[in-house]
Image (cartoon, grey):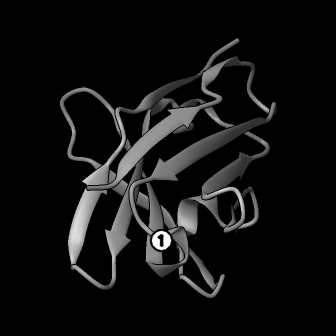
Amino acid sequence: QVQLVESGGGLVQPGGSLRLSCAASGNSFDRNIMYWYRQVPGNQREYVALISSDGVPNYIDSVKGRFTISRDNAKSTVYLQMNNLKTDDTAVYYCKAWDTWSNGDYWGQGTQVTVSS
């Protein structure tokens, strides 16, 4: 069983930056593909970015050039650096791990990001 704990959310003005962290435990972190999703109340959860077990990133178009996903396998942690934040980025951000050995999906509890002046 993989446990995920997100941190780093908060209130920021448009154009500002935040860095989200997601610490994992319960398996060998380097076999996980790690994801960030986000969800606005009343909407479906939306994929934002992923990073493969060997560090290859992928992003949705709306965050390309503004967000950077990274991982530190020694710390079992994935990060989402968010720059030039926009009001449309306001959401609860969730971390997900896909264990490529067990094919299990695991989710964190979410962290609120609010972009407002």
In this view, 4 is above or below 100: above
Q: Which residue is mark 1?
A: 28
State the residue in front, 32 or 90: 32
Residue 9, above or below 68: above
Identify the residue shown where x is 78% and y is 42%: 84
Q: As rendered, which of 89 and 96 lies closer to the eye?
A: 96
Front in this rendered view, residue 69 or 54: 54
Question: What is the total number of numbered labels drawn onto the structure image?
Answer: 1
Which quadrant of the figure has residue 11?
A: top right
Amino acid under disc 1: Ser
Q: Residue at x 67, y 68 (%)?
A: 73
Residue 97 percent coordinates (x, y): 38, 62
> Which image quarter holds the C terminus?
top right
Which residue: 81% across, 30% down? 16
Q: Is residue 64 above or below residue 89?
A: below
Report the residue that reaches farthest toward the top.
117
How dense is the environment of label 1, judged by Cα within 10 Å: few (below 14), some, or many (20 and up)?
few
> Which quarter of the rendered picture does the N terminus lie within?
bottom left
Q: Could you tell me which secondary element the residue under label 1 belongs to?
A: loop
